[in-house]
Image (spheres, coloured by chain):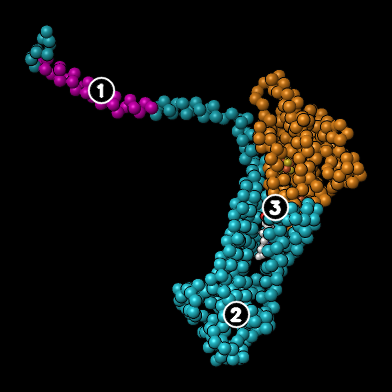
Chain colours: A cyan, B orange
Amino acid sequence: MCGFIKDKTPKAVARRKRIVLTSFAILLASVVLLPLGGYLYSGLSAQAAAEEQTNPRANYWRAVRQGNTGYTAVMGQETNTLIQNGGQNWRQWRNGPVANISPWFLALVLLSLGLLFLLRGTMKIEGTLSGRTVTRYNVAERVIHWYVAILFIILTITGLSLLFGRAVLIPILGYSGFSDWANFSILLHNYLGPFFTVGVVLAVIAWIKDNIPTATDWQWFKEGVGGILAKGKHPHAERFNAGEKVFVFWLGLIVLGAIVSITGFMLIGWIGEQMRATMQLVNVIHAVASIVWIGIICGHIYLGLATEGALQGMTRGQVSEEWAKQHHDLWYKQAKKG
Amino acid sequence: MARMKFLCDAERCIECNACVTACKNEHEVPWGVNRRRVVVLNDGVPGEKSISVACMHCTDAPCAAVCPVDCFYTTDDGIVLHDKDLCIGCGYCFYACPFGAPQYPQQSAFGVRGKMDKCTFCAGGPTADNSDAEYAKYGRNRIAEGKLPLCAEMCSTKALLAGDGDLVADIYRQRVIRRGGRPQTWGWETAYQS
Ligand code: HEM
Ligand code: SF4
Ligand code: SF4
């Protein structure tokens, strides 16, 4: 048995070598190539699937579902679109996060301010009043301030009525009562909006020179946020302290002023007639930016009232020297020099 | 109870715009407002299709969800109607509606648009049935007269169907069986979630 293998003639040995080598080569080639056959298979089946996928009818209606347009004899805005999907997304955003999170945000702001009042009370003027005063705001500045402030409050009340009135005011006023109020609100809001923007621009012009950030501002934040959180501290401050500069001026008037005004102008149609998709986005941005701004202004109003002697500056234009030294020492020195 | 629905058969609609005209005439719709329109897709190329579209009277209506004064209501027949005495013309329902149904008679310089107008499925509005006030604000109330929407009644090819959703679906199913091919209940998925 196995005489074949035992055959040791050179011819037989060479033949065996050849057999081993070729089998090895074939084996190697198979190991490399056979798995690649998968590509061939998947390539062919993908081709078949691609042929199946182009069901023209299904594609056709899928395109309609995604808002493609056609021709229509009826004139009007986007009348040539059969279905727009953006509306449902806008509904989810506006009736969802925008309407549900913002009341909590505003409640949190008011709660923190209430807590601050409990902890800190009014921020009194230290020492006795000498009766001497310095001029803090001239007539023009005061007019601009109250013009913007009154419009802001009107726009806040009317704007929030549109967003929350259905949930909050209909139960109180009834359907037709609230409808009358909403009608009045939207008129007031849309007509006064542009006047508010004019006020914002004037306020920026009036106060930008006093709101340029300086090195003192950083120190102000470090020292218990200007002594608002840490009692007894009175870090240096110029005409406006760092908190006023950052929140009221730069974030408020400049950034939010621009966002709210531009989106507002788009909503009232002053920047051309917009597609529905744009209006949906713009409405959400307008509402969110406004609510952030309302939160900031709540803080601004609180500090104006809780800091003894601050309100006089904006009503009569004069503040006591003691107030000025305590809260805006660097500005006081400048003002005294003339 | 019937659940009223519209269905436009894309294999039949020939874009004659008779439904659009019939609606405007029946309801004395204000200038610039069209409660119904016909949209032609792939206009002028093979496979061109026409669809007549108006308010679809959605099940979970987006217009009603966003209206700040909550002036929409759904009748027992599933028809979505609104109260023009409450509407403040804010335009929100137009932003929300998938089918572009809400329309406005005016566009003032400050974004106030006048009372929204849309297809009522010929069912009028909240005022007394077939009163003059109802006709002036919402048009004819054919449903109260026991009739179906005029657009569908007028349709010469019977492409546009209006009525109880089950009957509409039955008629359409028979058509599809007879002519072959797959059904295309256009817009139903969006409007009725079925
Ligand atoms: C800081 C002041 C402002 C506040 C607090 C405010 C707030 C709001 C709020 C909360 C809404 C309701 C959004 C909704 O219902 O989804 C709204 C809507 C609107 N706001 Fe303002 N807004 C302010 C300034 C402006 C300005 C400056 C303009 C115009 C230039 C404007 C124009 C509008 C318009 C047109 C609408 C939508 C109502 C409509 O669709 O007609 N707003 N605003
Ligand atoms: S089609 Fe538009 S207007 Fe009609 S019910 Fe649906 S969302 Fe409202
Ligand atoms: S336009 Fe009228 S019906 Fe439409 S959302 Fe505004 S108030 Fe409601």
Q: CA distance from mark 3 to mark 1?
A: 79 Å
Viewer-side label of 1, 2? 2
Q: Residues within 10 Å of mark 1 (few under 14, many from 20)?
A: few
Residue bearing the label numbered 3: A167
Chain bearing tag 2 is A
**Image side of residue A98 versus residue B2, left or right:** left
Q: Look at the image and give the residue range highlighted in magenta.
A: A11-38
- Say whether disc 2 or disc 3 marks the residue closer to the N-terminus: 3
Q: CA distance from mark 1 to mark 2?
A: 96 Å
Q: Is residue A232 placed above or below A155 in the rendered structure?
A: below
Which of A133/A17 is in front? A133
Q: As shown in the figure, which amino acid type bears the numbered disc 1?
A: Ile
Residue holding disc 2? A308
Element carrying mark 1: helix
Q: Amino acid at mark 2?
A: Glu
Q: Which residue, given by chain and number where applicable, does mark 1 sit on?
A: A26
**Residue A245 spot, x, y in % from top left:** 55, 73
Residue at 63% x, 62% y is: A290
Circle 3: residue type: Ala
Q: Nearer the viewer, mark 2 or mark 3?
A: 2
Q: Give the quadrant of ligand 2.
A: top right
- The numbered mark at residue A152 is none
**Residue drawn 86% across the image and 35% down it:** B144
